[in-house]
Amino acid sequence: MPDLLYPLRRVGHLVVEGVWRFGFAMRFLFLLLINSLQTLQRLPLLIREIYFAGVLSLLIIVVSGTFVGMVLALQGYTTLNSFGSTEALGTLVALSLLRELGPVLAALLFASRSGSAMTAEIGLMKATEQLDAMAVMGVNPIARVLAPRFWAGVVSMPLLAAVFNVCGIVGGYFVGVVMIGLDGGAYWSQMQSNVDLHYDVVNGVIKSVIFGVAVTLIAVFEGVNAVPTAAGVSGATTRTVVTSALVILALDFMLTAFMF
Amino acid sequence: MCLLGGYMYNETDYKPFIELKNVSFSYGTKPILQDISLSIPQGKLVAIMGGSGCGKTTLLRLLSGQVKPQSGSVWVDGCEVNRLSDRDLLALRRRLGMLFQFGALFTDLNVFENVAFPLREHTQLPEAMIRDLVLMKLQAVGLRGTANLMPSQLSGGMSRRVALARAIALDPALMLYDEPFTGLDPIALGTIAVLIRRLNDALKTTAVMVTHDVHVSLNILDYVYFIAEGRIVAQGTPHEVRVSTDPFVRQFVQGEADGPVRLHYPAADYAAELGLKQ
């Protein structure tokens, strides 16, 4: 007789496992935080990780940001033109980027560029016993390896989102003003009068900080819990990107509902 | 006396550096070590031998405090390892060097920084002194010329020697070797063996080595314990091992396929499984 309850049990199993993992991740976040004092006292370690997680992501962030801004301007111009309000293009580009696209897209790119690299690196360090070696030398791997990477991600994420926004706005200017020939003064002045520092900019920064915590926590957690084999590390890297993407989108929806 | 406070060792005249008393350990319900008792005097090089998966590496992890036994006690230099607080355990580990199976060098640091790592983490020495110490340790393993290379540029034997230099960076009182001979060519293997013995004689370090390489290690060891299925089944000096008539030791030393340790994993009757017998 076929097991009719199997799909149901499978769903239950997945839910229970998800709750377990969430619990472990939160306990891990707590461990990271209580071991962070040492990290913040040793700035060279942190700066090195910011270089790897943040600075090396700049190229993809700059290119993507510019193109997203350019596309926004193109699409926005077509729509706005039919209402005869093309001078609002600057506002449209800036608000779309600051409120939504900047934090979300930068976080997605960051997860796939730096998050996956962190998971793979930490997973391989675990597989090759480097983390064990450190512990046996009397050095806490959480404070020496994991916490610096976590904080590097948390610091880099809002900065990368800001760079993304700036590039997008410049890209929009390029398409709207330089290529299409709208009035440059209108582009900037409309943007200046319609973008609110607290309501639009600060809320966007808050979003990107939260995304930064989520993505780096997932990346470091998956890395340190990876099964120490080739298949295990590759699976963990995939999970980092997929889980990060889903978590970013879910968090973004919730934050938007609260903020705007 | 334990320098870290805590539990003092009482016997005064005979003082083993390492002592395991009735230690049992299991992962979940799977028993790994059962009722192991052994003692290792200061300055000796002792090997734990046994087949793969017999619990040898777990024994090293017990000594370094990475895992705790379910029953029994583990003593290192007068300290009961399984009862130390986290801080005391870290302090004990600073006096302990461990050579991992494949070296476990930090792949993001070059050779120099790998060897300097314990010095930088645990001491406040000036940079010039760290430099001299690192070069001395690298010279001791014959690899001073590799200081600026990355671990990925080293051969297996060379990484193991750099790892050895890193393990002795703080002049440990206890060295633990986890399968130091695995996967090395004969020359590299001989080099590591000579280095291990020489370090022990020069630094008066107590050393525990987990290995299944009988022929090389018997030349450098002081004493051997054989473990099978989580228990000590034989022990002796290298000479006693070579002339032993114990069937397990003979099988292990001669490398015979079948003996007290069976070739075949337990399975259903062969003929029945092939359908030749009802």
Image (tube, coloured by chain):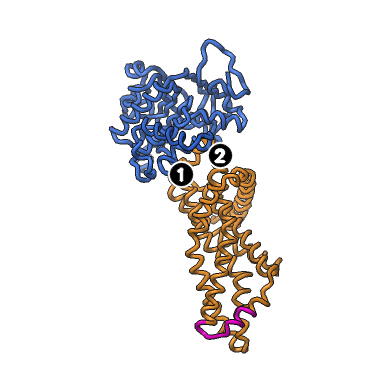
Chain colours: A orange, B blue
- As for residue B190 lying within the magenta part, the answer is no
Q: Tag 1's secondary structure?
A: helix
Q: CA distance from mark 1 to mark 2?
A: 17 Å
Instruction: Measuring from the top left, give residue A107's x and y in whole percent.
Output: 56, 62
Q: Residues within 10 Å of mark 1 (few under 14, many from 20)?
A: many
Instruction: Measuring from the top left, give residue B144's x and y in whole percent.
Output: 35, 36
Q: Is residue B238 above or below residue B53?
A: above
For residue A127, which numbered disc appears in the image? 1
Q: Which residues are magenta?
A: A178-189
> Which quadrant is home to the C terminus of chain A?
bottom right
> Which quadrant is home to the N terminus of chain A?
bottom right
- Can residue A4 be seen from the camera position used here? no
Q: Return the residue at label 2.
A: A140
Which badge, 1 or 2, comes first in the chain's sequence?
1
Disc 2 residue type (three-letter):
Asn
Which chain contains the residue that carries disc 2? A
- As for residue A188 lying within the magenta part, the answer is yes
Q: Main secondary structure of the magenta part?
A: helix
Q: Is residue A118 above or below residue B124?
A: below
Q: Nearer the viewer, residue B88 or A43?
A: A43
Q: Tag 2's secondary structure?
A: loop
